[in-house]
Image (tube, rainbow, N blue to C red):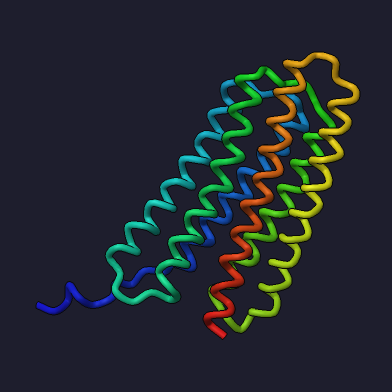
Amino acid sequence: MFSIFLPRDVNFSELFEKQANYAVDAASYFKELVSKGTLDEASYQKMHDIEHQGDDVAHAIFDHLNKTFITPFDREDIHALAKRLDDVVDMIYTIVNRLKVYKLTSIHKNLIEFASVIEESTRAVAHAVKGLGNMKNAKKIFEYCVEINRLENVGDSMRDAMLADLFETEKDPISVMKWKEIYQDAETVLDICEDVAHVVQSILVKQA
């Protein structure tokens, strides 16, 4: 009769790893799309599918969190980590959606450069999150977090340089507005990756 109060066998580490892998999938596909300069309905739908799969894992984590008595680390950190990982995929999907709506389908070297940095950051995120399954890897996890922070700083500089170039060279005000938003959203992805790193670092400190 007391079984309902016992902790369920939930592998949160495995679920977080799945989430992080979807972030990498989204970033890699985003880079592929902008490198090819094509965004048809099929490619848009594929990105939507990745975003939906990421949502499913996030919802599973939240559901298990509400039903699990004992968790591997603080419940607040579990919730924050799942939320921020989901935000990474959502933001990449948002950029692709806006590219489609704004009809920005030509190859754009600045966006390819941004997409490459985003992919690097999500891969570092995936390594950091995967490492949480074994706290003996704390030093390596911390190194990945430092790399994520570095890439966010790179993104800040890229955004500022690209905006400066945009304002100087683009004469069409509508085009300026569109690309300004895209660049800012791309940098926001890196901000969110850094948020993930902060949550991971918080977990490391508490588990030390």
Q: Position of residue 192 (x, y in %)?
A: 62, 52
Q: Position of residue 95 (x, y in %)?
A: 63, 33
Above or below 157: residue 102: above
Q: Position of residue 182 (x, y in %)?
A: 70, 32
Above or below 103: residue 96: below
Of 158 and 38, the residue lying toward us: 158
- The residue sitting at 30% across, 63% down in the picture is 66
In which quadrant will I find the C terminus? bottom right
Left or right: residue 133 compared with residue 58 = right
- The residue sitting at 74% across, 41% down in the picture is 115
Of 80 and 72, the residue lying toward us: 80
Left or right: residue 22 compared with residue 56 = right
Q: Position of residue 119 (x, y in %)?
A: 71, 48
Of 65 and 169, the residue lying toward us: 169
Residue at the left extreme, as displayed: 1
- The residue sitting at 78% across, 48% down in the picture is 156
Above or below 28: residue 207: below
Q: Quadrant of residue 10?
A: bottom left
Q: Quadrant of residue 69?
A: bottom left
